[in-house]
Image (cartoon, grey):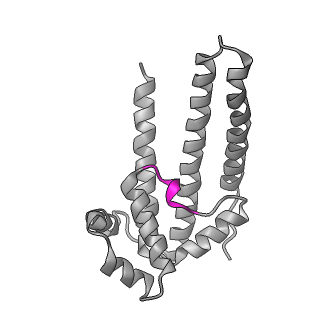
Amino acid sequence: DAQPVTQSGTQNLARAMEAHCLRLLLRKPENLYTLDRALQAAGLSRFSPQDFENAEHQALAKFVIDALGQDQMEPQHYIQEQTPEGLSDLQAELLAPMPKGEPSESQRIENFLQTIVKLRLIRVNEGINQMRFMQEDIQEQSDATLMPYRELLPQYIQARVRLEIALSKPFRLD
């Protein structure tokens, strides 16, 4: 079966995209405000740890958001000093010099936006595919069993359209 390989490949790609987003965010956490405004201007929800599936990535994203919310010290300094022990190896790995050099501020923001929207698109497409498979599995059953899936599919398709539209034009950065 070729499908498990595709699923695994998609999961690896999504995990790499999550790490890339964190790599960019850790370099300048304050960019999150600009990123959120640009996502909202594109009709999308703000960045959230739930954008990630990997538990360590979620925890690190939450830590960065918490660093921005505290007022004891500068977020960058807070991140360096207060990183939970279980996340310090991941943080060090993500803060290692980038192989192709450090991006400029505008490249970092644009790259994050492109990556997070593509990551969301992967998740929505996975949801649509799961719906299709579930629908096929229960096709023989009654219409009442199919109703929840018939209601969810249009929501996934609308989300995909919003994400594709957001990717098709430049993000507004204030």
Residue 103 showing in the rendered view? no
Judge from the rendering whether residue 17 lies leftward or rightward of residue 135; answer left or right.
left
Magenta segment boundaries in residue numbering:
47-53
What residue is shown at x 40% (from left), y 35% (from top)?
8
Judge from the rendering whether residue 97 lies leftward or rightward of residue 173; answer left or right.
left
What residue is shown at x 61% (from left), y 74% (from top)?
34
Residue 137 showing in the rendered view? yes
- Viewer-proximal residue, 126 or 9? 126
Judge from the rendering whether residue 142 lies leftward or rightward of residue 77; answer left or right.
right
Q: Position of residue 17 (x, y in %)?
A: 45, 53
- Viewer-proximal residue, 47 or 27? 47
Q: Quadrant of residue 84?
A: bottom left
Is residue 108 magenta-colored?
A: no
What residue is shown at x 43% (from left), y 89% (from top)?
72
Q: Position of residue 140 (x, y in %)?
A: 65, 10
Looking at the image, residue 151 lies above or below residue 20: above
What residue is shown at x 69% (from left), y 36% (from top)?
152
Query: In the rendered image, which quarter contains the C terminus?
Result: bottom right
| Count of residue discs | 0
Residue sticking out furthest to the top:
140
Looking at the image, residue 58 lies above or below residue 124: below
Q: Position of residue 27 (x, y in %)?
A: 42, 74
Looking at the image, residue 18 lies above or below residue 103: above
Q: Position of residue 47 (x, y in %)?
A: 57, 63
Query: In the rendered image, which quarter contains the N terminus?
Result: top left
Judge from the rendering whether residue 92 lies leftward or rightward of residue 169; answer left or right.
left
